[in-house]
């Protein structure tokens, strides 16, 4: 993980209404007129201002101006590092071509692969930084970034190095995921097993040796890799000590949710076509469901993810942008909060948990960030709003007043 040095001054954050997102009777974990004490970049104490322990009364004070303070947002599924633009495919889709048609004709992910292979590391960094800054301006303090537009060892490593550089530059914690099994590269056409061999024998060992990623992901779909191939990859990832995640059941039900659960995956993502059996397995394994309303919307999908069943079985739901050039060219997590509510029928509180507490769990970071609670990083977003539901309600507004990362104010 790329932990940018975010340690700011010790002090107390006052004059704020807190949405701590700590589970309890109130879905936002609200504290009116709250105080948060920060020591060495971590939260030392949280509670009503009137109960702030005496020792903290002489500390440096940060005035939140009466706004709402939430945990820093976490975007737990992005492909933000990529080159090229696929607006032409958007036009093709509007004229009737499907995502699968375009992929089978060599476009889609492979179009982005061509552009990303051609881009220099510096070009990739500059284009990605531009997108990342916009994402961060909405209160994001942790972002997951996947590779997967290289599909050869050098380009996959280039993408992961750029992801690390972005973390150092932009004031954000970066969780990196290796997604070599995103699509079959043209040089391996018709030889998927041989490509999986390459990943297992060459790419993954190098990624692990050079500490380029925290987790391994795969696209398990009829236009990508089979459940058996994903499973083989997961076994190798586990041997190398890497966590696993899965793009599962986005276009069809291949039992991806259950496969992810069996592998002890941190998350299974998309899940529009998941069965109840998969969801039960995910609940049991503690695998988080990452909902991606941007991709659902852009593909004009009509199959809704089974949110009611997720609730029934107690599957934690995260929400993310899926920022990518094909199916979700989106750098707004606030817009995803709105779409998670309007399209998927999450409550605003569930959506907010989806970009804080549950997004942290989707990255295995629940002991690091995602709530305003003692012991966690002092990662906050400050909002000029009257109630938390406003975060999911407004379209195209950005009421973020500032980010706090590891106790340090960042006015982007
Ligand atoms: O999460 N599902 C696969 N991967 C991406 C889309 C990538 C692309 O089309 O470039 C997703 O939606
Ligand atoms: Fe994705």
Image: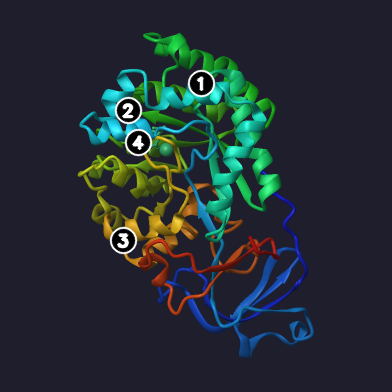
Q: Residues within 10 Å of mark 4 (few under 14, many from 20)?
A: many
Q: Earlier in the sequence, mark 4 or mark 1?
A: 1
Query: Does dot 3 land on a helix, a strand or a loop?
Result: helix
Quarter that holds the C terminus? bottom right
Query: What residue sits right under mark 1 in the picture?
Result: 151
In the figure, residue 49 lies in which quadrant? bottom right
Q: Residue at x 49, y 48 (%)?
A: 76
Q: Nearer the viewer, residue 365 or 182?
A: 182
Q: Are marks 3 and 1 in contact (CB under 8 Å)?
A: no
Q: Vertically, is 266 above or below 386?
A: above
Q: Position of residue 60 (x, y in %)?
A: 77, 78
- Check if mark 4's residue and mark 1's residue have beta carbons within 8 Å: no
Task: First in sequence, mark 3 or 1: give its number.
Answer: 1
Q: Is tag 3's residue or tag 2's residue first in the polypeptide sequence? A: 2
Q: Residues within 10 Å of mark 3 (few under 14, many from 20)?
A: some
Mark nearest the camera among 2 and 1 is 1
**Viewer-closest of 108 and 253:** 108
Mark 2 CB near ligand 1 (8 Å cut):
yes
Q: Nearer the viewer, residue 10 or 386?
A: 386
Precedes in sequence: disc 4 or disc 3: 4
Q: Of the numbered discs in the image, which one, if any, rests on residue 341?
A: 3
Q: Position of residue 234 (x, y in %)?
A: 47, 28
Q: Nearer the viewer, residue 331 or 367?
A: 331
Mark 1 neighbour class, 10 Å CA radius: few under 14, some 14 to 19, many 20 or more:
many
**Element type at mark 2:** loop
Label number found at residue 99: none
Q: Quadrant of the N terminus?
A: top right
Q: Pointer 2: what residue?
A: 221
């Amino acid at each position: 993980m790329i932990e940018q040095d975010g340690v700011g001054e010790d002090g107390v954050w006052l004059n704020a209404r807190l949405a701590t997102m700590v589970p309890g009777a109130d879905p936002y974990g609200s504290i009116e007129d709250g105080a948060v004490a920060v020591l060495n970049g971590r939260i030392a104490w949280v509670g009503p201002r009137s109960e702030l322990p005496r020792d903290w009364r002489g500390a440096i004070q940060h005035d939140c101006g009466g706004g709402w303070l939430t945990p820093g947002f976490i975007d737990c599924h992005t492909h933000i590092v990529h080159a090229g633009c696929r607006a032409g495919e958007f036009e093709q889709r509007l004229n009737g071509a499907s995502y699968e048609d375009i992929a089978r004709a060599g476009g889609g992910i492979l179009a982005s692969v061509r552009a990303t292979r051609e881009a220099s590391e510096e070009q990739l960094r500059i284009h990605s930084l531009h997108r990342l800054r916009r994402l961060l301006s909405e209160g994001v303090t942790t972002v997951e970034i996947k590779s997967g537009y290289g599909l050869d060892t050098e380009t996959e490593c280039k993408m992961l190095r750029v992801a690390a550089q972005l973390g150092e530059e932009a004031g954000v914690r970066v969780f990196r995921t290796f997604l070599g099994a995103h699509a079959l590269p043209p040089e391996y056409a018709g030889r998927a097993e041989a490509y999986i061999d390459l990943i297992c024998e060459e790419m993954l060992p190098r990624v692990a040796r050079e500490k380029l990623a925290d987790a391994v992901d795969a696209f398990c779909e009829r236009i990508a890799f089979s459940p058996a191939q994903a499973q083989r990859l997961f076994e190798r990832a586990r041997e190398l000590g890497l966590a696993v995640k899965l793009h599962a059941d986005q276009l069809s039900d291949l039992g991806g949710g259950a496969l992810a659960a069996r592998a002890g995956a941190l998350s299974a993502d998309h899940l529009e076509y998941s069965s109840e059996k998969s969801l039960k397995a995910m609940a049991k394994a503690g695998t988080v469901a990452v909902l991606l309303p941007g991709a659902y919307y852009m593909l004009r999908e009509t199959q809704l993810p089974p949110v009611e069943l997720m609730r029934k079985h107690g599957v934690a739901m995260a929400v993310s942008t899926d920022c990518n050039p094909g199916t979700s060219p989106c750098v707004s997590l606030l817009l995803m909060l709105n779409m998670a509510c309007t399209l998927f029928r999450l409550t605003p509180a569930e959506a907010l948990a989806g970009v804080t507490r549950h997004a942290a769990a989707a990255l295995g970071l629940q002991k690091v960030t995602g709530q305003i609670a003692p012991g966690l990083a002092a990662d906050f977003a400050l909002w000029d709003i009257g109630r938390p539901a406003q975060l999911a309600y407004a379209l195209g507004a950005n009421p973020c007043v500032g980010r706090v990362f590891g106790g340090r104010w960042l006015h982007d």
